[in-house]
Amino acid sequence: MPASDDQIDLRGTPCPLNFVRTKLHLQKMAPGSLLEVWLDPGEPIEQVPDSLKMAGYTIEQLKDCSGFYALQVRSADL
């Protein structure tokens, strides 16, 4: 995985709160920055990537880390 500019651990955070927190974090980051988000299996990993894509963000990578997922998402360019 490429080196992330920032990382947040949202394991244990329910939907849709994990999407909202990810989106708010991305909005604070510099344009084009890479954020790594740790998400639980099940609903979080099924919902958050799709919601981010619909909001206009680019999913760079998704990695299964045995028990949680590391999602890399690129903040929006200006």
Image (cartoon, rainbow, N blue to C red):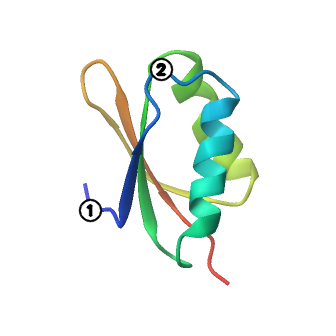
Q: Mark 2 points at which residue?
A: 12
Residue that appears at 63% across and 59% down: 57
Please name the amino acid that badge 1 sits on.
Answer: Pro
Dot 1 lies on which element? loop
The residue carrying pointer 2 sits among few (fewer than 14), some (14 to 19) or many (20 or more) residues within 10 Å by Cα, namely few
Q: Mark 1 points at which residue?
A: 2
Residue that appears at 25% across and 63% down: 3
> Which one is nearer the viewer's eye here, 74 or 25?
25
> Which one is nearer the viewer's eye here, 8 or 34?
8
Please name the amino acid that badge 2 sits on.
Answer: Gly
Residue 66's tag is none
Give the answer, above or below, for where 43 lies relative to 47.
Answer: above
Dot 2 lies on which element? loop
The image quadrant that residue 9 belongs to is top left
> Which one is nearer the viewer's eye here, 39 or 53?
39
Comparing labels 2 and 1, the label whose residue is closer to the camera: 2
Q: Where is residue 22 in the image (x, y as percent from the top left)?
A: 58, 47
- What number of labels is visible? 2
Which of the two labelled residues, at mark 2 and mark 1, occupies the earlier sequence position?
A: 1
Residue 4 is left or right of residue 30, and the answer is left
**Quarter of the figure with the C terminus:** bottom right
Give the answer, above or below, for where 10 lies relative to 52.
Answer: above
Q: Position of residue 41 (x, y in %)?
A: 45, 19
Give the answer, above or below, for where 43 lies relative to 10.
Answer: above
> Which one is nearer the viewer's eye here, 30 or 46?
30
Residue 19 is left or right of residue 74, and the answer is right
Calculate the distance from the C-alpha at mark 2 to the C-alpha at mark 1: 25 Å
The image quadrant that residue 67 belongs to is top left
